[in-house]
Amino acid sequence: MIPLNDSQIRTSFVNASRKEVSDVSLPAELETIDFEVRDFLGWRDKKLPRRAYVVTIVDGAPVGVLLRQADAMPRTRPQCAWCQDVTLSNDVVFYSAKRAGQAGKNGDTVGTLVCAEFQCSANVRKLPPLAYVGFDAEAARQERIATLQQRAVAFTSSVLNGVG
């Protein structure tokens, strides 16, 4: 992922009002984030605990999405739709996002199950266990990284383009 600054992040939001953008609490550690090991930038709002944000790179430009966490927690332990890590030690929650433009103004939303604290980039970079003799764990890790990037961008694009 390309490094982002405060201004780039704030101007990237496609489904938030000006007021919501001005209220965004950026990550405190923004200056120290290693974007080389990030496939997207995701964080929870410290002031509004049910609000979160994700920024991905779509066609070379940052696209930000305001997310809202569902009030209810899933009854069973779900799998993150983005990293699909089956050995997670963290919670997975349901986030919804208004679609951009008129669709969002009409109340159209899209949702996904994601790691509660957006640990997906770290999860996919762990070497998977050897599945069989000759298993290429590094190739599997690289495939998981690429798949995570595709899923995060697909979600952001669905918010941006109003495509299910």
Image (tube, rainbow, N blue to C red):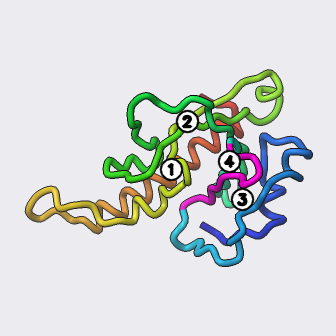
Q: Quadrant of the C terminus?
A: top right
Disc 1 is placed on an element classified as helix
Residue found at x 47% / y 31%: 74
**Residue placed under numbered mark 1 in the picture:** 150
Q: Earlier in the sequence, mark 3 or mark 4?
A: 4
Characterize the local packing of mark 1: few (<14), some (14-19) or many (20 or more) Cα atoms within 10 angstroms: some
Residue located beneath label 4 in the image: 52
Residue on which disc 3 sits: 61
Mark 2 vs mark 1: which is more N-terminal?
2
SS state under label 4: strand
Q: Residue at x 77, y 70 (%)?
A: 5
Q: Main secondary structure of the magenta part?
A: loop
Q: Nearer the viewer, residue 49 or 78?
A: 49
Looking at the image, is mark 2 or mark 4 earlier in the sequence? 4
Callout 2: SS: strand
The residue stretch that appears in magenta: 39-49
CB atoms of marks 3 and 1 within 8 Å: no
Q: Amino acid at mark 4?
A: Ala
